[in-house]
Image (cartoon, helix red, strand yellow):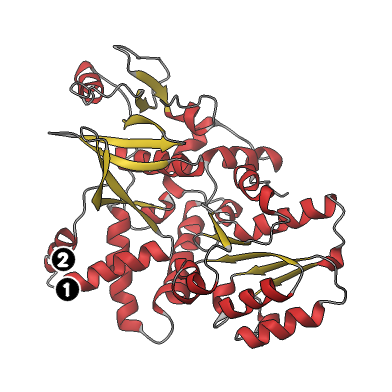
Amino acid sequence: MKLKRETYLKQIRPYYDSDIIKVITGVRRAGKSVLLETIRDELAEKGVAEDDMIYLNLEDMDYAYIADASDLNREIKGRITHGGRYYIFLDEIQHVEQFEKALASFRASLNVSLFVTGSNSALLSGELATLLTGRTVEFEILPFSFYEMEQYYKLNEMEWSEELFFDYLKWGGFPLRFDYRDEASVRRYLMNLYESIVSRDIIGKGKNAERRTFLEISLYILANAGKELSVDNITAAYRKENKEISRRTVYNYLEKMKKAYLIHGVGRYNIVGKAALGNREKQYAVDTGFRTINTNTINYEDTFFLENVVYNELLVQGYTVYAGKTYKGEIDFVAIRNGKKCFIQVAYLLINEETVKREFGAYHKITDASPKYVMSLDKIDMSHDGIIHLNIIDFLLRRKELILT
């Protein structure tokens, strides 16, 4: 049974009939193809004829003959038989060389609404940006949120419990991973998925030595997602294993991971100066399953896993997110939407007075009047001194919304 990814559909629906090109990006197997299928179903419900919707999955071997922009141009124009409106869906378009030329041509010469997906941020850089300036709108699709996991289970009549949060925390939300029931199979699926992303979207074929090095470094970065992690930290860790790697190589690998949507770089926000700072200091994994495949054991009290899940949910809900910096400390997140913001601290459990003082005390010298939250898995409301305590699962399942000012 399908899952309507309503959060993303709400963003895309206003553009269904627009001439602007809808670019749906995100990490491979995050559910972009399912989203395209849902859009096609909705258009059909609105009365669009099946013959007026052209769908090509460019990873399908049936379309291996479409290698470049000229091939794509011939394929699409060969399917157009009248002058009316067509809706064109091109899935994983990065496999077509110079595809941007074909998109520019379609938009200029045909009566079409274009939807394209891809797994690499190069889709919106270089020639594409030049040829299509002002003619594209991007939607980044993440793997299932915990809220979507709940919907998926219930739609498919699977046994649901909020205790599955720990399964989600460990194995993440890639849609196809829910087809597997035992942990060994899930781990194998995620490892194969990650290695295929590296081979197809980052390193390419025939570069085994570089591929091995990238896998080592990238999995180290993912295993430490959420922690302050500089390029120097990474090269030092590599040297401990009697290996050498340059700072430039590590920096390039970080950029490649961001471009393939494996991680998000999180900038710092100077809470005192109320401004974003230029340099980035943290990375979060697009999916916690990619963290798990490089760790031997999972400590559920590791707040970096919890931070990662909260960070991804904030992105899904449309927030711009920073790591907050104070004079002498840090606030986990500054979440901003529509010009309003709030502050967020993430903890596992507020198990004793010392933990409560530490988490709530992070706000002690912050004079900014924006709402301040401490999120944890505790079910008892511990709000005090104007600081709001919020249960993480209530937030993830969207039972409670953040207040912003």
Three-letter code for the amino acid on which mark 2 is drawn: Thr
Q: Nearer the viewer, residue 45 or 33?
A: 45
Looking at the image, residue 311 lies above or below residue 250: above
Looking at the image, residue 70 lies above or below residue 366: below
Q: Decide if residue 101 is on the left or right side of residue 219.
A: right
Numbered circle sitting on residue 246: 1
Instruction: Report which quarter residue 312 is drawn in.
Output: top left
Q: Decide if residue 370 is on the left or right side of residue 123.
A: left
Numbered disc 1: secondary structure: loop
- Please give the name of the residue rendered at 54% of the width and 30% of the height, measured from the top-left corner: 398
1 and 2 marks in contact (CB < 8 Å)? yes
Classify the position of the C terminus by image quarter. top left
* Residue 112 x %, y %: 74, 67
Q: Nearer the viewer, residue 345 or 273?
A: 273
- Identify the residue under disc 2: 235
* Residue 353 x %, y %: 22, 16
Instruction: Report which quarter residue 18 is drawn in.
Output: bottom right
Query: Gap between marks 1 and 2, in whole Å?
Result: 7 Å
Residue 209: tell me if it is visible. Answer: yes
Q: Nearer the viewer, residue 350 or 62?
A: 62
Three-letter code for the amino acid on which mark 1 is drawn: Ser
